[in-house]
Image (cartoon, coloured by chain):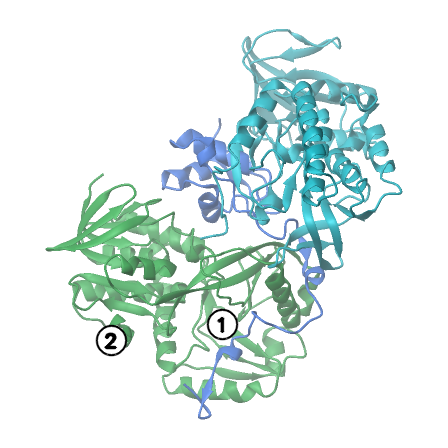
């Protein structure tokens, strides 16, 4: 199979990039392991903060919007297909679980997103302990209630979205436990959920499934009896495809840990490989869209479907939007990461 | 850390660690093993780890492998369980014309006292019921088997450390120098002195030899191996090309490429390997492959081990070979004998480095 | 934390086992993987790699950027042999043992 541009991952960043590339007349091929394009958006029923070019939408509405606007453009789909590796000549190997076949493209845009991190504690392997993303997909994709009473554990910012989602399917939220240092409120938001800051789960107990947990708080130990614990350990960029493509990597804690080095064009150390979305560093929905547009603009420039002067204008405007819309720490880390493009910490990973 | 040692071994892989352990068993002298990374990071950690004798040619080389394989049961008793299993080795063939080759091989081995059987189709299928019924026959040797390479090197290291051997890891060697009464070894972390130096750098032997003006004609050969999800035990033997590990994973591969130190895997070879595995054992086709890995094998220019003292440089030894897993207990024993007894229990002149002069 | 807590769920490897390899001189995820099997299971280290990096960081002088991620392997996710295999029986690099044996004057060398 052949295309001008291969996009790996049909989440918000990949779909955005597909649109921006295809509308310049280039032929795009999108691969995603799921049968439905849209990625994690289908699990997000909350209203998203998006760049001003979009109206406010819920996650699944955005998914639908991004897919529908590709209609009529030169976009081919390989849904339900996985990239499993690389051939000696650099072609990407794809499987549908019946066959493995090569795909050739002039440029590749990696939009494989991020994966959740774990926070271990004694007996965290008990059934009932899961990541927050797993709970979201149980509710949104399978329409199944993951449990009847939940404790949310972690440091990150998804808590309010997830609380709203859990409450909507009548899961009682027993507590939110945060490890971070500041001491502040004792309840969460306006939902009156008990909040334990500077606290951690010391142990889980249960016979074959989660029954109770001990939480060390600054005011002593408490024991709660939820039937699920949802771990929110933040996210890290997924590296497996960029690693196989021999892209050089750097560590950038603010962006989620190890990730491919990339330049102002979101181009990796391999000329034909670009990155976008959470693969460029874990950020918010606006950044997914904006980096999708950024990678697309650079690919179009490289394939001469956009003139360089115009591309530079587009890129500058996208960067200034990005600066406004993502957390300032994230944006500065991204700028630093771009600056360090030529000094990766891990390269030539296959040379013994 | 102390920088003066009686013996320094460069390379902590299966050969270097094997030598350090065997030497420490018989000597109270101080020993340091230096590794550029951590043992198992190179060839020793990326192998199917067959302990394999049969089909090695010519017969005198088979003999060396045979003696080493015979040391394995004893080695396990000394250093701990390395999951050595003498499964018997089976090399199937699918063309009747290969039977002639197989018969010749058995004949040649008979002269050195190694028993190889040439099996009929029925005998193969009796030994390995899941083998492809298209098989025409196989050569079979009862002495072949396999070992868990991770356990092997880990156990060698632990046993050696118990005997006082020190390891310096993540410490690449930059320069070697012969001085009066010994050697200077300059590394990233420190500069060491020793009376005796053993080069066991495996794939890097050529580069190591250059540092002290010894030509060690070592090349690299890449082998790619597929690993399946754990399957219930169904393979009884070490089949040339695939074996089943204790935890049920099946390792498959018999590829050879000249790619220098590039240890990437490629879908091209993975697909060929999958073809081979299904051809040998069709029932395996539903199994999932969970990972592939490449190993860069050490391959001396003529294929045979380079073992022994280096002529004209007193107290310098080389041990560099293909089939390091099979040969390690014997090479460890022989180098120890050379150092302590000044002679070896079996002749090894044939394997000396002077053959390349 | 309790040293018996599991880090690698697939192979059930605990903090204690990981720390022991670091004590022996292991410094990378892959050193630990080879000796303990941590990260060799079904998820191929997707869950545990970051946790192990934190253990290495805590126990050694290494900063997080000096602790490389594990060597990622193909296939990127598991695939059946049947899907991976092609119909071809042409082998360019994969050989059989008997292929390697050469006869000279009708005899094995």
Residue B60 in the image: state x and y as whole percent. 35, 80
The answer to whether residue B47 is visible is: yes
Q: Colour of chain A?
A: cyan
In the shown orientation, is residue B118 left or right of residue B79?
Answer: right
Other-residue count near label 1 (Cα within 10 Å), few / some / many at <14 / 14–19 / ≥20: some
Image height of A295 relative to B9, above or below? above
Q: Residue furthest right?
A: A72
Tag shown at residue B349: 2
Q: In which quadrant of the rendered view does residue A90 lie?
A: bottom right
**Number of numbered tags placed on the structure image:** 2
- The residue singled out by tag 1 in the image is B88
Q: Residue furthest left?
A: B180
As rendered, which of A292 and A310 lies closer to the eye? A310
In the shown orientation, is residue B130 left or right of residue A45?
Answer: left
Give me the chain letter of mark 2: B
Q: Colour of chain C?
A: blue
Write down which chain is painted green.
B
The answer to whether residue C43 is visible is: no
Residue A11 in the image: state x and y as whole percent. 75, 36
Q: Residue furthest bottom?
A: C105
Give me the chain letter of mark 1: B
Residue B21 in the image: state x and y as whole percent. 29, 55
As rendered, which of A201 and A349 lies closer to the eye? A349
């Amino acid at each position: 199979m052949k295309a001008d541009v291969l996009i790996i991952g049909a989440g918000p960043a990949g779909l955005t990039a597909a649109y921006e590339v295809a509308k310049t007349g280039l032929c795009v091929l999108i691969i995603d392991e799921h049968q439905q394009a849209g990625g994690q958006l289908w699990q997000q029923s909350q209203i998203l903060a998006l760049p001003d070019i979009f109206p406010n939408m819920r996650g699944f509405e955005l998914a639908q919007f991004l897919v529908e606007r590709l209609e009529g453009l030169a976009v081919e789909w390989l849904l339900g297909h996985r990239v499993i590796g690389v051939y000696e000549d650099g072609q990407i190997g794809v499987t549908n679980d019946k066959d493995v076949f090569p795909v050739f493209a002039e440029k590749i845009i990696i939009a494989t997103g991020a994966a959740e991190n774990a926070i271990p504690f004694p007996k965290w392997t008990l059934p009932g302990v899961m990541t927050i993303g797993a709970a979201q997909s149980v509710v949104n994709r399978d329409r199944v209630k993951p449990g009847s009473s939940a404790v949310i554990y972690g440091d990150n910012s998804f808590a309010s979205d997830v609380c709203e989602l859990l409450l909507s399917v009548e899961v009682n939220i027993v507590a939110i436990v945060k490890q971070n240092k500041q001491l502040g409120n004792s309840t969460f938001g306006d939902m009156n959920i008990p909040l334990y800051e500077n606290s951690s789960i010391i142990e889980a107990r249960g016979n074959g499934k989660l029954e109770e947990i001990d939480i060390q708080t600054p005011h002593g130990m408490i024991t709660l009896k939820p039937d699920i614990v949802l771990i929110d350990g933040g996210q890290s960029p997924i590296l497996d495809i960029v690693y196989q493509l021999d892209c050089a990597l750097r560590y950038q804690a603010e962006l989620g840990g190890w990730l491919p080095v990339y330049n102002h064009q979101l181009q990796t150390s391999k000329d034909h490989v670009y990155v976008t979305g959470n693969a460029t560093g874990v950020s918010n929905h606006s950044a997914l869209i904006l980096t999708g547009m950024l990678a697309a603009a650079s690919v179009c420039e490289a394939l001469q479907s956009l003139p360089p002067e115009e591309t530079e204008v587009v890129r500058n405007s996208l960067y200034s939007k990005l600066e406004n819309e993502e957390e300032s720490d994230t944006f500065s880390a991204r700028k630093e990461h771009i600056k360090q493009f030529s000094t990766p910490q891990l390269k030539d990973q296959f040379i013994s | 850390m102390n920088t003066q040692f009686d013996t320094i071994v460069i390379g902590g892989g299966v050969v270097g660690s094997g030598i350090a352990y065997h030497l420490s068993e018989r000597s109270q002298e101080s020993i340091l093993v230096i590794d550029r990374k951590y043992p198992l990071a190179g060839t020793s950690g990326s192998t199917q780890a067959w302990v394999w004798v049969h089909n090695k040619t010519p017969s005198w080389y088979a003999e060396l492998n045979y003696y080493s394989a015979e040391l394995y049961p004893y080695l396990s008793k000394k250093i701990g369980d390395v999951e050595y299993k003498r499964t018997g080795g089976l090399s199937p063939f699918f063309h009747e014309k290969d039977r002639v080759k197989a018969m010749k091989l058995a004949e040649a081995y008979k002269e050195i006292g190694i028993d190889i059987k040439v099996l009929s189709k029925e005998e193969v299928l009796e030994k390995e019921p899941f083998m492809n019924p298209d098989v025409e026959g196989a050569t079979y040797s009862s002495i072949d088997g396999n070992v868990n390479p991770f356990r092997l090197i880990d156990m060698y290291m632990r046993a050696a450390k118990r005997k006082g051997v020190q390891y310096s890891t993540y410490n690449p060697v930059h320069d070697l120098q012969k001085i009066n009464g010994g050697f200077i070894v300059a590394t990233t972390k420190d500069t060491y002195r020793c009376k005796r130096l053993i080069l066991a750098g495996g794939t890097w032997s050529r580069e190591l030899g250059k540092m002290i003006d010894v030509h060690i004609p070592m090349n690299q050969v890449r082998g790619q191996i597929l690993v399946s999800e754990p399957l219930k035990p169904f393979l009884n033997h070490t089949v040339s090309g695939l074996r089943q590990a204790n935890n049920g994973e099946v390792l498959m591969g018999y590829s050879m490429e000249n790619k220098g130190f590039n240890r990437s895997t490629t879908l091209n070879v993975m697909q060929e390997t999958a073809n081979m595995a299904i051809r040998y054992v069709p029932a395996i086709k539903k199994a999932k492959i969970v990972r592939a890995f490449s190993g860069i094998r050490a391959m001396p220019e003529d294929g045979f081990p380079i073992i022994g003292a280096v002529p004209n440089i007193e107290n310098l030894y080389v041990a560099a070979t293909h089939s390091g897993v099979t040969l390690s207990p014997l090479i460890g024993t022989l180098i120890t004998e050379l150092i302590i007894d000044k002679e070896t229990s079996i002749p090894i002149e044939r394997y000396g480095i002077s053959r390349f002069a | 934390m309790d040293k018996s807590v599991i880090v690698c769920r697939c192979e059930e490897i605990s903090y204690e086992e990981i720390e022991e390899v670091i004590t022996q001189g292991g410094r990378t995820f892959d050193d630990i993987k080879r000796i303990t099997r941590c990260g060799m299971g079904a998820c191929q280290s997707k869950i545990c790699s970051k946790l192990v990096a934190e253990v290495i960081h805590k126990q050694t002088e290494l900063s997080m950027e000096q602790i490389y991620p594990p060597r990622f392997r193909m296939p990127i996710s598991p695939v059946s042999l049947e899907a991976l295999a092609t119909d071809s029986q042409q082998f360019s690099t994969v050989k059989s043992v008997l292929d390697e044996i050469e006869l000279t004057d009708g005899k094995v060398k």
